[in-house]
């Protein structure tokens, strides 16, 4: 009887841990998805800056004004970009300096993504361990 | 867990602002702009920008102290 009670308590504890781990895994997956999306955005920015610097002079661009509508505008400066740097602040920087900063940001995000994937693997390993244990009892 | 997330967000914002401060002080930032409403940026003096950063950093540090 006492043994049964102790087994039930152990199972309850494992179930609770499992729920927590599933939650953690889902949270990590969402963070990785956000990072992937940000890296993709930044890669597009780099491509855009390269194009503007090499071929953007006097080019006409379509500027969105909402609800799928655009107006035409001309690029008047192919050497500088205004970058958001946090809070409500933006700075104007040369395109080459801006590309260095963006690449640094991409590297930092890639490192973070790697760390999160390792953490996810640890969490998944623990989930597999618990599931295997609960199948044995 | 919620408090841990809140702390991480505040720390990230603090790091961003400290990086922004370095960019302005190093001269990489040729001009500085502040967002005054959705998508409207207005050029501000670099000293104004640095003061803005200083105020935000102080507020973030105070908020971080409260979460720990």
Image: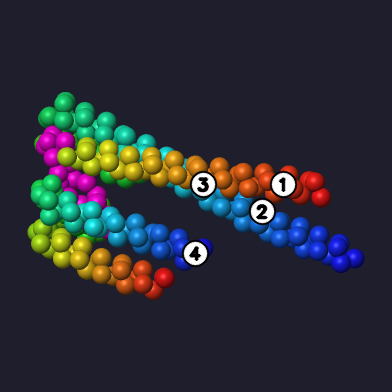
Disc 4 + disc 1, Cβ < 8 Å = no
Chain of the residue under label 1: A
Does the magenta segment cover residue A92?
yes
User: What residue is shown with label 4?
Assistant: B2
* Chain where mark 4 sits: B
Image mark count = 4
As measured in the structure, the alpha-carbon distance from the residue carrying label 1 to the one carrying label 3 is 19 Å
Please check whether the numbered discs 4 and 2 fall on a single chain.
no
Count neighbours of disc 4 (C-alpha within 10 A) and say few if under 14, some if 14 to 19, many if 20 or more. few
Answer yes or no: do the residues labelled 3 and 4 have beta carbons within 8 Å? no
On the image, numbered disc 2 is attached to which residue? A18
In the image, which residues are magenta? A77-96
Residue tagged by mark 3? A119
What predominant SS class does the magenta segment belong to?
strand
Tag 2 subunit: A
According to the image, label 1 marks what residue? A131
Residue drawn at 51 percent across, 63 percent down:
B1
The one nearer the camera, B43 or A122, is: A122
Disc 1, SS: helix
Same-chain check, marks 4 and 1: no
């Amino acid at each position: 009887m006492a043994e049964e009670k102790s087994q039930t308590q152990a199972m309850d504890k494992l179930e609770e841990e499992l729920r927590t781990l599933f939650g953690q895994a889902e949270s990590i997956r969402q963070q990785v998805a956000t990072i992937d999306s940000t890296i993709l955005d930044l890669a597009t920015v780099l491509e855009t800056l390269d194009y503007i610097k090499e071929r953007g002079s006097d080019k006409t661009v379509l500027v969105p004004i909402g609800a799928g509508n655009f107006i035409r505008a001309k690029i008047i400066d192919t050497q500088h970009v205004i970058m958001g740097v946090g809070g409500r602040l933006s700075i104007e920087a040369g395109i080459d300096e801006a590309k260095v900063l963006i690449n640094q940001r991409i590297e930092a995000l890639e490192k973070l993504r790697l760390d999160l994937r390792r953490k996810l693997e640890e969490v998944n390993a623990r989930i597999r361990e618990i599931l295997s244990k609960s199948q044995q009892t | 867990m919620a408090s841990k997330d809140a702390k991480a967000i505040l720390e990230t914002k603090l790091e961003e602002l400290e990086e922004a401060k370095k960019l302005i002080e190093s001269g990489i930032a040729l001009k500085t702009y502040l967002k005054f409403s959705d998508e409207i940026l207005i050029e501000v003096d670099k000293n104004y920008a640095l003061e803005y950063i200083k105020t935000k950093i102080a507020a973030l540090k105070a908020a971080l102290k409260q979460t720990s």
